[in-house]
Amino acid sequence: MNKPAIAVIGLGHGGMVAAIKLRQQGYAVTIFEKKTKEDVGYPWYDDIRADIFECCGLPMPPRDCYTNKGKRLFISPDEQNSLKVPSAKPMEEISIDRRALLRHMTALCADAGVTVRFETKVDALFLENERVRGVIVGGEKLPFDFVIDASGLFSPFRGQVPVRFHVQSQPGKTDVMTAWRGFYRWTPDTAAPDPDRNIYIKHQSSVGLSWCNLNDRGEVDVFVGRIGGMTEAEKDAAVAALYKNHDFFSGDVLREGQWGYISLRGPLGRMVADGYAAVGDSAFMTMPMMGSGMECAMQAGLWLAQHIADNNVTDFTAANLWGWQVRYYRELGARYVFVDLVKRWVLNIDVDLLNWLFGCGAVTNEDMGLVSTDPDNPNKLTAGKILKKVAIVLKKPAVIRQTAVWMLRAAKAKKIALSLPEQYDAAKVDAWQKKYDGILTKLEEKN
Ligand SMILES: Cc1cc2nc3c(=O)[nH]c(=O)nc-3n(C[C@H](O)[C@H](O)[C@H](O)COP(=O)(O)OP(=O)(O)OC[C@H]3O[C@@H](n4cnc5c(N)ncnc54)[C@H](O)[C@@H]3O)c2cc1C
């Protein structure tokens, strides 16, 4: 019997990992990518854990397309105080050329025997009898047994899935960071900053962050990100403020700025339907604080292929795919729902209180190791250290009030996320999803 045929929409990272692994299991896999081979991805470097490749059983990208990730310094909104994140071990996290990464992964797809069709836009899902039966390309219905949606944050396909699966069609306004990134020349004869990565939290009292850094290639990398949208004028004002504060920022454009959108929320409540699964940004799989999504997508793509192999799935129903969503939530998703709520705390806390927190000594550079990726970080939070912090924070009851409310909400959201039914039962899954979506949409309305 022929193995089922699988379509992947978009050259998303998770879709590609799933495609390679499923092809290795003997499935016929086709990826449809609307852009050209040259245009796909972003013209810059982004951060990713290096071990994700080994974890997915893939070779590392060529050595010349990544560098070690730099040290990070978080700067308070009033720019008076900062907190430094201890650096990760060399090459633990890498800064990678996004286009070279896609070239590397596309080559791996081709080696595995996956068909990759560039410049081929999928117009819509092909539906029949309340089930996804394939894709529509150039008006033609192309039948597939299973469609993996790796088309990114604004996937139009989620909204086409039969309504009985309740797949949320679009993210809420405050679930998305509108980002602008531009590259400039380094001002001659100016010193390189140390540490090399500054991140301005609530820059200019905004709901978002900015940075102005000098990368390993001697380029000034300017980023402005705002949750809930950003006008050209707001972006210009932020860039002008960064220009004023950084001697090494010449203002001389190297590469035109580019707008982008970053998912900053907990994962999609329903990732699977009959004949369909969403992976990566199309399932809101980023880390909601910083928006890193490449490794979550790759991990999820691997787990999807493993789930299909382990359960010998040949009929791709929501029920048969549900175990994959359960694994994602248990291993990553629930943690990220917690982070989503912590992010909302940071964004909702008064700017003055945040400034105070940066400078009061309750949070130290040592503590910032907790947000680094080093699992062997020696700086643990001991009872003594916690007591000292509590004594400082007690001086500002407003901090305790605002923090306690959000931490309780975060714990509740995580508990709900973890309570998803182990087995697929449509009524139970609907009831769970109502609770889960409810907590995020209620907060979205409040923001
Ligand atoms: C400024 C910026 C900085 C970021 N920094 C980081 C970082 O440091 N680390 C990190 O991990 N992540 C970062 N991210 C997030 C990261 O880009 C995403 O999380 C990541 O790309 C995962 O998305 P994906 O693989 O699911 O899909 P995407 O990368 O969004 O790819 C989707 C693909 O689908 C294609 N497509 C869409 N519609 C169709 C269609 N109808 N037919 C065919 N093809 C289609 C698109 O052309 C695209 O190639 C950043 C994002 C931005 C914008």
Image (spheres, rainbow, N blue to C red):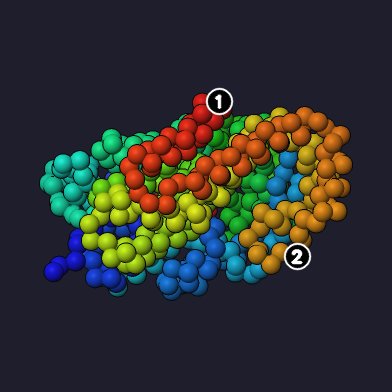
Task: Give the labeled residue for mark 1.
Answer: 446
Give the camera-side residue of 262 and 104. 262
Image height check: is 76 above or below 185?
A: above
Query: How many marks can you see?
Result: 2
Q: In the displayed image of the protein, which residue is found farthest to the top?
A: 446
Please tell me in which quadrant of the rendered image residue 396 appears: top right
Using the image, tell me which numbered label, if any, was put on residue 260: none
Q: Is residue 361 left or right of residue 140?
A: right
Q: Residue 274 at what x, y percent from top left?
A: 25, 48
The residue depicted at 75 percent of the width and 53 percent of the height is 367
Residue 165 % position (x, y) = 31, 39
Task: Identify the mark nearer the N-term, 1 or 2.
Answer: 2
Compared to residue 49, the image places residue 328 above or below, namely above
- Closest to the observer, 355 or 129: 129
Q: Residues within 10 Å of mark 1 (few under 14, many from 20)?
A: few
- Category of crowding for the residue at label 2, using alpha-carbon neighbours closer than 10 angstroms: few (below 14), some (14–19), many (at least 20): few
Asked whether residue 343 appears in the rendered view, the answer is: no
Q: Position of residue 242 (x, y in %)?
A: 66, 40
Quick one: SS at disc 1?
helix
Q: Nearer the viewer, residue 38 or 282?
A: 282
Q: Amino acid at mark 2?
A: Pro
Q: Residue at 71% of width from left, 36% of height from top?
A: 403
In the image, what residue occupies the spot 78% across and 39% down?
357
Can residue 71 be seen by looking at this rendering?
Answer: yes
For the point 20% across and 60% down, the residue is: 5
Instruction: Indicate the amino acid at tag 1.
Output: Lys
The picture places residue 178, in percent across and down from the top left corner, at 50, 37
| Residue indicated by mark 2 | 378
